[in-house]
Amino acid sequence: VITQLFPDTTPAAKAFNLQPNGSSAMGMTGANFLPGAKILFNNTELETSFGDTDKLGATVPANLFAKPGKVKVTVKNPDGKLSDPREFT
């Protein structure tokens, strides 16, 4: 379950939580995340870091938010179970 995204919005093509490699970083809180869980950004698997069963983070390449619109963010646990989507605008 995803309860909140950090951030959950950004202007199109504007980096957020800028990382040294030029990608942006997002975090999330939720419940029942397992080690090895992956954040999916419109079904694109992101490089994901496991914080705890209620915290995940990921880097988001700039091309994934280059155009305005709404993006479906989900979490896929190693057992294949997928969370309900949250919206990133």
Image: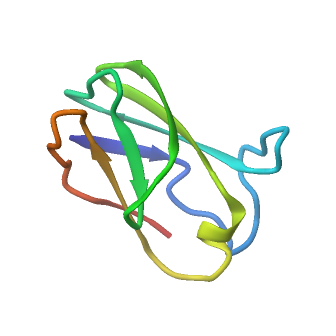
Q: In terms of depth relative to the viewer, which is nearer, 84 or 35?
A: 35
Q: Residue at x 62, y 70 (%)?
A: 65
Could you tell me how many numbered marks the image carries?
0
Q: Residue at x 55, y 62 (%)?
A: 9
Q: Residue at x 38, y 40 (%)?
A: 38
Q: Is residue 69 above or below residue 25?
A: below
Percent position (x, y) of residue 37? Answer: 33, 33
Residue 11 found in image quarter: bottom right
Drawn side of residue 77 relative to residue 70, left or right: left
Drawn side of residue 59 relative to residue 32, left or right: right
Percent position (x, y) of residue 32? Answer: 19, 27
Drawn side of residue 16 relative to residue 48, left or right: right
Percent position (x, y) of residue 13? Answer: 73, 72
Q: Residue at x 71, y 52 (%)?
A: 16
Drawn side of residue 21 relative to residue 44, left or right: right
Q: Quick one: quadrant of the N terminus?
A: top left
For this orientation, the residue located farthest to the bottom is 68
Percent position (x, y) of residue 71? Answer: 44, 70
Q: Is residue 46 above or below residue 32?
A: below
Q: In terms of depth relative to the viewer, which is nearer, 76 or 31?
A: 76
